[in-house]
Image (cartoon, helix red, strand yellow):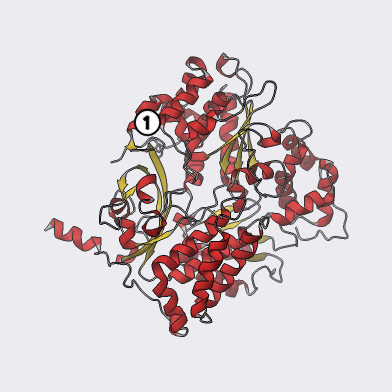
Amino acid sequence: MLKVEETQPVEFSSVLLANFDEIVSRYPEGKQKSALLPILHLVQAEFGWTSPLAMDKVAEYLNIEPIEVYEVASFYSMYFLQPKGKYVLEVCRTGPCCLVGAEKIMDHIESKLGVKEGEVTEDGLFSWRGVECLAACGYAPVLQIGPEYTFYENLTEQSVDQLIDDLRKK
Amino acid sequence: MGRKLLLEHINVPGINTLEVYRQKGGYRAVEKALKTLTPDEVVEEVKKSGLRGRGGAGFPTGMKWSFLAKPEGVARYLVCNADESEPGTFKDRYLMTYIPHALIEGMIVASFALGAKTSYIYVRGEMMPQIRILEKAIAEAKAAGFLGKNILGTGYDLELYVQLGGGAYICGEETALLESLEGKRGNPRIKPPFPAIAGLYGCPTVVNNVESIAAVVPIINDGGDEYAKVGIGRSTGTKLISASGNLVKPGVYEIELGLPVEEFIYSDEYCGGIANGKRLKATVAGGSSVPILPANLTLKYANGEPRLMSYESLSEGGFATGTMMGSGGFIAFDEDQCIVRNTWNFARFYHHESCGQCSPCREGTGWLEKILHRIEYGHGKMSDIELLWDVQRKIEGNTICPLGDAAAWPVASAIRHFRDEFEWHVKEPVKSLSSNYGIANYAVPIEKKVEEVKQDNI
């Protein structure tokens, strides 16, 4: 997943392109730019991040200027503009989660993984970061892991340990 | 037990499937609307119901629909706002996860009423599991003839799509949402023109919250007049409340509007009281944007009358002693929580989420975060409290969209009701790092409900 480097060409598979085509078909003719956000999600799921080269290819596919892709990818918090670990643990750090211990969970993840927020572990497997409200305040503290955005609720230090150990074994 | 209009069948196994949903009376509203009513009659029922937008603003849904321009030969759109991101709010996630067909059914009826041939559900990108659930539900509905060409043989065509967001709170603002749906940054538009005149792709568009759309189903099934009988005064119907924070039973509850706040917090049917036997210090009653209230003002008006869960009652007393219904994100703070820290946390949230378009919001939210951070971490000055007040006042009302107000209100209300806690942080910088101010003078200590119940039993 992290093998893609800026110097390597990015190729979209025929499966991926077929998915792009299906998304574009949802909008009126000439409004294909509406497909940009969904397509960037597919690109990130495939390559692990939205690299400049991948964004250029998306611009070419949608027949828009590259800057129109960059400005969108840099505006929305879900798109990674740098390579991340295979598993990015995104912990909600907003009010309601902090009332029930989200900050302790983040401290625990930092010491367990041994990397600071935004960094990648040496084996390339993990990154973590605090994110803003994930709309799951009743099940706090919570974290999510892309690209499936599987949800883990009512976190404890033990359940986080278990989760990280399980992902390592995968 | 309060009446349930949206979540009546939520515990029925398989209610997320079309088959079980139909067994429980699902898609009756589609049949009734498309076969026996005209689009204008559907709008009329929604008007009669008194339904108010459930996303936060509380604007009457039927009236919003009636503003939709209908020029000849121009497409019209219905867009569902499922970009649920207001801290404290998670009701739409719940509804889409467990009873997705309620939203799909509402979308079909509402699209018919508005004359939309293509409708979109804009879901925040983080809700990938819910997106898959909705797409499956749409496929089921289409296979059963409720979507696509010539629905139920009535000649009405509708395509319904799920659109993914990219993780931006601002896209919950309807014009930012439309920008995002057009593949752009989520910068809110200057109004007018309102979306009802020029919305998606410049065409007349209605944007409604998930819960508002789902509420159309019982309104059409039972009639607008019946719906209006539920609730209290101009707060008709039921409302989904997302309860979080230090509660025994956080979660999503459907309440009849008009339920006393005290009953909502303490009764076992709802939140079951404050967790770990602690006392309530404060609440944010309608999502992070609405003013925070100390416990005493949460439960009662300044004149001592009980406060109810309704649009009017929650805002009784204005910002001096009241708050707002907002999106129904009810956050409870126990006696150990620090108001300064929470206010800093919310300010950081708004700074992070400001789109950067208007200077008062872009710069002001940054200042709020910085000043609150230094007060919280023991470097504050007394003048910082006045500075906070000054900055929030200069943001409020001076921005294109309501995010500026939403950032200002939590700060203003925290200072208004909890000023002595801010002053304590300044006076006791070391102590405030290791301990909490506690429940304090402003929040008249509320008796522990557990003890009261025991006494009743004796």
- For the N terminus of chain A, the image quarter is bottom right
Tag 1, which secondary structure? Answer: helix
Residue B309 drawn above or below residue B304: above
Q: Please indicate whether residue B265 sits to the left or right of residue A62 in the image.
A: left
Residue B212: x and y in percent read 48, 37
Q: State the residue at coordinates (43%, 71%).
A: B338
Q: Which residue is mark 1?
A: B227
Q: Does the rendering let one see residue A100?
A: no
Residue B220 in the image: state x and y as whole percent. 44, 25
Q: Residue at x 72, y 37 (%)?
A: A23
Chain where mark 1 sits? B
Residue A103 sits above or below residue B211 on the image: below
**Seen in the image, is A74 located left or right of residue A54?**
left
Given residues B47 and B3, the one toward you in this image is B47
Q: Amino acid at mark 1?
A: Tyr
Residue B217 in picture, x, y percent from top left: 45, 29
| Image coordinates for residue B174, horizontal then vertical, percent | 60, 43
Q: Residues within 10 Å of mark 1 (few under 14, many from 20)?
A: many
User: In the picture shown, does residue B160 fall above or below A54?
Assistant: above
Along the line of sight, which residue is nearer the eye, B273 or A162?
B273
Count the marks.
1
Q: Is residue B234 left or right of residue B43?
A: left
Compared to residue B101, the image places residue B317 above or below, namely below
Q: Which image quadrant is residue B371 in? A: bottom right
Report the residue at 49% width, 73% height from top. Answer: B385
| Quadrant of the image occupied by residue A83 | bottom right
Please say whether residue B184 is visible from this viewpoint: yes
Q: Residue at x 74, y 51 (%)?
A: A72
Q: Nearer the viewer, residue B166 or B446?
A: B446
B413 vs B95, nearest the viewer: B413
